[in-house]
Image: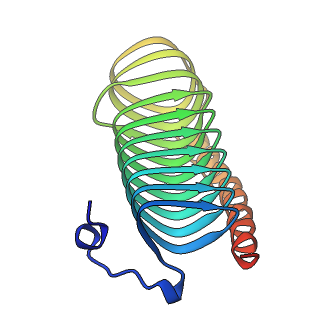
Amino acid sequence: MNEQHNFGSQPDPSAGDVSAETVNVVNGGARSVYAHTATITQGGASEVKAESVTIRQGGATKIEATNATLRQSAVAQVKAETVEIVQSGVALVQADEVTLNAGRATGVYAGSATLDGTLAQVVVSRGPVQVQESAVAAMVAPSMTVKSLVVGLLFARHVEGDVRALFGPRAAAAFGAAFGAAFGVTFALARTATRQQRRKR
């Protein structure tokens, strides 16, 4: 893949941009990363555009990818075809297929989604959703298969499994606001840590 052609903008190395077929960032940071395969470990970047992106114990402001995997990381926005989020926090996820495993998300917009041990504010899915041991303030989906879900507001044509409505619309809004504030603090701390790592380069 020619990342410069596909992504439009021209990387500026003097500003901290990194461009290569394969990019590995370890204990450091970059402004923008353009690659076919990008891996960030204990580091961070403002923007990552690649076919395949993996972030471990790191952070990013924005990710655009075909496939993205986050492990113990914090990201503001992810847009991809498939996203796997493991023990990580994300503000906004947009993908055809989303998997959240022990993850936290403010907004999830997906073609289909799997939530396992997840806390989310809003989940909207065009296709089926599978849920296990999770809590969501508001969820919209055509069909759901559930093994223990606590939800504030639920809009679904077909639900199979154990769903418990915790509260009504007003309480759901309060829960969503409280979760959003708590996630904002967590993400701000993660971004601060990422900036500190970048200064150490």
Image quarter where the C terminus lies is bottom right
Q: Position of residue 112 (x, y in %)?
A: 34, 32
**Residue found 37% across the figure and 54% down from its top:** 65
* Residue 150, quarter of picture: top right
Q: Position of residue 118 (x, y in %)?
A: 60, 33
Image quarter where the N terminus lies is bottom left
Q: Depth check: give the residue in front, 65 or 144.
A: 65
**Residue found 53% across the figure and 35% down from its top:** 100
Taking the image as shown, residue 119 lies to the left or right of residue 50, namely: right
Q: Position of residue 115 (x, y in %)?
A: 51, 29
Q: Is residue 145 positioned above or below 184 on the image?
A: above
Q: Is residue 201 positioned above or below 154 on the image?
A: below
Q: Is residue 118 positioned above or below 72 on the image?
A: above
* Residue 19, quarter of picture: bottom left
Return the residue found at the far front. 21
Q: Position of residue 57 (x, y in %)?
A: 68, 51
Question: Coloring scheme of the render?
Answer: rainbow
Q: Is residue 156 positioned above or below 51 on the image?
A: above
Asked whether residue 168 is in view, the answer is no
Taking the image as shown, residue 167 lies to the left or right of residue 6, namely: right
Taking the image as shown, residue 92 lies to the left or right of residue 127, namely: right
**Residue found 65% across the figure and 39% down from its top:** 87
